[in-house]
């Protein structure tokens, strides 16, 4: 294999310029007021959704570990980040990344602790166990005020500073894409994919399945933690209901609709999902507002019936692949 | 001690309702390996059908249960034909996503104003509540009805699966679909029958749930559905006695946690038991360990 085992960052100069150009245009539109605050919030939310979904794609799409507990880590990241930034009295640009990274680390540590025993389970059983874990964490969030008053329990956590802005979301999102891309096209990525395809065969050729599965799970959950931290500082309010079982399902839907094992697909589906749900809210007249959540599952069913592999299948846009994988 | 026994009976009541839902999950999983997320919402539709039969048409309870069962069976078969059958050869995850889609659709469509409406409704009770005192433990006639109907249906199901030709065909398909097809079994029909029976049981469960915990709304199916599913996994998914055992355990654990520890922790306790059991026995209590083929 010519690709070697090193992690390399070669996103490509042209690509980098296009991405920066896109960022500059969007940021200009926001600053100049063409994009109103509502759309700005959706834009940030879309980025957050993408980060979280990329994490689940690493766990499920690339490693094949069926997880229905992603929202738990999203919530853990959110609450941790909010608690950390709240305890920092000083102001400054560095406050948000410190909080977000603290959230990511906490999510990662808990993922490690829960992953070591639970990842021994296979397919649907793993899904159920992670679902159960998500439920337990949700109940803990609802009772959190008994331990830490500021977390607010079932009433939710209020008074988080609004620190998340488009540039921050963009930076974290870009970072997530770069990390994931370089991970999955490295030797580690091939090990993960081999586990997805056939764990027993992977073991037979010397892949230590347990440690790779745990690694994938921890990194994926850290992505969820990052997303949670950004979310907390975007909406300035955290409610346990925002991290329940249905939120885990949302992320799963995005990953599968986008295409398992496809970064491009996750970006399209994640952004599309945020804009579809919020967009329908704007477009539909208020009389048919309640049809929004009737249309959405129908879209879901139709997409699955006609494109059961997801939008992108397992493929990528050319620019996201390393040189030697590219089509000419 | 009597207090404990009393709570045990209350837990059993909840467990039997879960069992009726769990049977549908376990049968469908056993035959097509699909976590049918829409099953909890079929249960909800059953509760509403019973509601209309009792409240609007003033029918007696047994008729209401039968209406709910027939209606849900039709709904179950319809869902299977429209949403799952075309995906039989697709990756398993696509059927799962479709099931989630169907689930969301049922919840939000039925909560539209011209269908069931988004609000809570009080469930009618077609009879006066009476309680019987058995040396300190009280049993209500509602509990007797729940136990009676649930046990009757479970016995009927067991006889059906073990004694009839269709039941034998179901077992054959769940054991090896391709071999069953070679033996001349119409696999598609058997799968439809399985969905129909599972949905009918959930429908009956819905009516019993409505009578026992008298408040319904279009989203009522989510939690009992999830717990029934977890119960099926707990007992060993695909195994009919396992679903009953798992459901009864879930019901009792939940009730005892509520009474002795904290009502806010009751949901967490049920899922904690699940994780512990799965770590010790990865395929559930009655599940057989599958040999990995190399």
Image: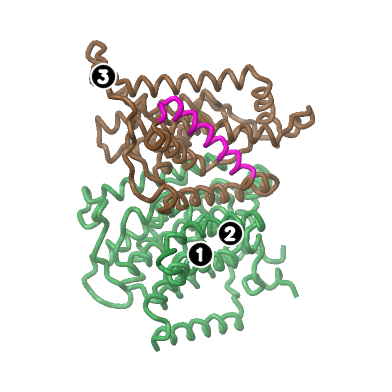
Q: Answer whether residue A113 is magenta in the image.
A: no
Q: Nearer the viewer, residue B279 or B113?
A: B113
Please state the horizontal and vertical placement of residue A284, each as a whole percent of the image.
46, 69
Query: Residue at point 61% right, 79% down?
Result: A12
Label drawn at residue B131 = 3
Q: Circle 3: is it few (<14), some (14-19), or many (20+) Cα within 10 Å?
A: some
Question: Chain B's colour?
Answer: brown
Q: Earlier in the sequence, mark 1 or mark 2?
A: 2
- Whether the magenta-drawn stretch holds residue B69 is answered as yes
- Indicate the colour of chain A: green
Work out whether disc 1 and disc 2 sit on a shared chain: yes
**Real-space Cα separation, disc 3 to disc 2, in angstroms:** 53 Å
The spot of residue B256 in percent (x, y) is 30, 28
Nearer the observer: mark 3 or 1; the answer is 3
Give, as a single range, the part of the protein colored magenta: B59-81
Secondary structure beneath dot 2 equals helix
**Considering depth in this image, is A37 or A5 the residue closer to the camera?**
A37
Give the CA separation, mark 1 to mark 2: 10 Å
State yes or no: discs 1 and 2 in contact (Cβ < 8 Å): yes
Q: Are marks 3 and 1 on the same chain?
A: no
Residue B74 drawn at (x, y percent): 57, 37
Name the residue tied to disc 1.
A273
The disc label shown at residue A257, or none = 2
Along the viewing direction, whichever of B33 and B54 lies nearer the viewer: B54
Furthest residue to the bottom? Answer: A32
Cα–Cα span, label 3 and label 1: 52 Å
């Amino acid at each position: 294999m010519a690709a070697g085992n090193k992690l390399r960052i070669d996103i490509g100069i042209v690509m980098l310029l296009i991405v920066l150009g896109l960022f500059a245009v969007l940021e200009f539109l926001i600053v100049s007021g063409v994009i109103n605050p509502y759309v700005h919030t959706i834009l940030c939310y879309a980025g957050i959704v993408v980060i979280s979904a990329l994490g689940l794609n690493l766990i499920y799409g690339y490693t094949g570990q069926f997880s229905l507990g992603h929202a738990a880590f999203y919530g853990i990241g959110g609450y941790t980040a909010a608690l950390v930034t709240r305890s920092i009295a000083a102001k400054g640009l560095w406050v948000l990344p410190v909080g977000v990274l603290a959230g990511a680390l906490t999510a990662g540590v808990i993922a490690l602790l829960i992953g070591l025993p639970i990842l021994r389970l296979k397919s649907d059983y793993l899904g159920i166990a992670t679902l159960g874990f998500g439920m337990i964490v949700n109940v803990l969030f609802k009772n959190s005020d008994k331990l830490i008053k500021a977390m607010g329990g079932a009433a939710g956590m209020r008074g988080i500073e609004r620190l998340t802005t488009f540039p921050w979301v963009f930076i974290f999102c870009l970072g997530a894409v770069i990390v994931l891309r370089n991970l999955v096209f490295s030797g580690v990525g091939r090990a993960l994919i081999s586990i997805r395809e056939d764990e027993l065969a992977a073991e037979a050729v010397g892949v230590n399945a347990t440690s790779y599965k745990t690694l994938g799970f921890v990194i994926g959950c850290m992505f969820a933690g990052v997303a949670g931290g950004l979310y907390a500082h975007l909406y300035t309010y955290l409610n346990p209901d925002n991290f329940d079982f249905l939120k885990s399902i949302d992320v799963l839907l995005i990953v599968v609709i986008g295409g398992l094992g496809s970064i491009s697909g996750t970006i399209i589906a994640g952004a599309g999902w945020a804009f579809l749900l919020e967009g329908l809210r704007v477009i539909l007249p208020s009389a048919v507002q309640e049809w929004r959540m009737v249309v959405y599952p129908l879209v879901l069913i139709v997409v699955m019936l006609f494109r059961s592999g997801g939008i992108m299948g397992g493929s990528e846009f050319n620019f996201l692949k390393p040189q030697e994988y590219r089509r000419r | 001690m009597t207090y404990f026994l009393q709570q045990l009976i209350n837990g059993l009541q909840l467990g039997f309702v879960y069992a009726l839902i769990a049977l549908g999950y376990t049968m469908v999983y056993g035959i097509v390996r699909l976590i049918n997320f829409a099953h909890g919402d079929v249960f909800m539709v059953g509760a509403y059908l019973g509601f209309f039969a009792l409240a609007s048409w003033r029918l007696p309870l047994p008729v209401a249960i039968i209406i709910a069962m027939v209606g849900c069976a039709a709904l179950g078969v319809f869902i299977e034909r429209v949403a799952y059958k075309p995906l039989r050869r697709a990756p398993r995850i696509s059927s799962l996503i479709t099931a989630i889609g169907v689930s969301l659709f049922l919840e939000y469509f039925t909560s539209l104003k011209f269908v069931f409406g988004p609000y809570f409704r009080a469930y009618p009770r077609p009879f006066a509540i009476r309680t019987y005192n058995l040396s300190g433990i009280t049993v209500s006639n509602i509990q007797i009805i729940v136990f009676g109907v649930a046990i009757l249906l479970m016995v009927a199901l067991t006889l059906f699966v073990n004694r009839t030709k269709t039941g034998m065909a179901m077992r054959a398909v769940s054991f090896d679909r391709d071999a069953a097809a070679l033996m001349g079994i119409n696999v598609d029909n058997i799968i439809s029958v399985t969905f129909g029976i599972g949905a009918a049981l959930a429908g009956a469960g819905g009516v019993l749930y409505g009578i026992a915990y008298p408040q319904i709304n279009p989203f009522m199916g989510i939690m009992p559905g999830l717990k029934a599913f977890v119960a099926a996994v707990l007992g060993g998914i695909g195994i009919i006695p396992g679903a009953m055992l798992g459901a009864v355990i879930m019901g009792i654990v939940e009730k005892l946690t509520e009474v002795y520890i904290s009502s806010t922790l009751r949901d967490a306790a049920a899922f904690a038991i699940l994780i512990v059991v799965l770590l010790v026995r990865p395929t559930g209590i009655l599940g057989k360990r599958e040999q990995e083929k190399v």
